[in-house]
Image (cartoon, rainbow, N blue to C red):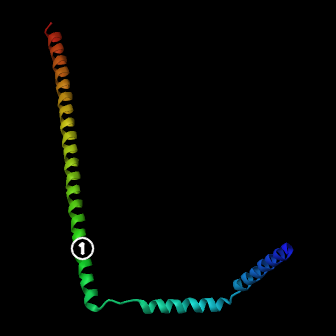
Amino acid sequence: MAEEKKTSKKAEKADKAKDKKKKSRKNPFKSIASFFKSVKAEGKKVVWANGKDVLKNTVIVLVVVIIAGLAIYGVDTVLSLGMKGLKNLADTNTTTTAAVSDTVEDEATDESADTATEAETTTAAE
């Protein structure tokens, strides 16, 4: 009896394996046809919006896009002006620093020229 159960279980497993092989050997054209049939069935389930709803949604989208565009433009303009202001401030500081250093160099040159002139005058007077 135990042997019959083992044998019957083995037979069932063999039958299942054969069924799987048969199922895996489906006709590919039938699979493709069933796919397109299901696509058509799903397409019939789609509910299309009427013209008023489409127009209303289009206007809403355009208004939101315009508002977002204006907001981005405003932020960009403010940041651009801020960067230009910082650049002008940096240029002004550079110019001021250069002018101060030029003035200091000119004063140092003038002092050494005055010292040289005084030394020449003193030497000539002696």
- Image coordinates of residue 106 in percent, x first then y, are 18, 29
Tell me the amino acid under the disc marked 1.
Val
Q: Locate residue 32 relative to residue 65 in the image: left or right.
A: right
Q: Locate residue 27 relative to residue 83 in the image: left or right.
A: right
Quarter occupied by residue 11: bottom right
Residue 107 sits above or below residue 46 on the image: above
Instruction: Choose between 22 and 117: the one closer to the eye.
Output: 22
Instruction: Choose between 87 and 27: the one closer to the eye.
Output: 27
Rendered residue at 84%/77% (across/down) = 4
Rendered residue at 27%/77% (across/down) = 61
- Image coordinates of residue 44 in percent, x first then y, are 44, 93
- State the quadrant of the C terminus: top left
Residue 33 sits above or below residue 20 on the image: below
Residue 121 sits above or below residue 27 on the image: above
Give SS at disc 1.
helix
Q: Residue extending furthest top?
A: 126
Which residue position is annotated with label 1? 64
- Image coordinates of residue 124 in percent, x first then y, are 16, 11
- State the quadrant of the N terminus: bottom right
Quarter occupied by residue 8: bottom right
Quarter occupied by residue 2: bottom right
- Image coordinates of residue 16 in percent, x first then y, are 74, 80
Instruction: Choose between 81 and 25: the one closer to the eye.
Output: 25
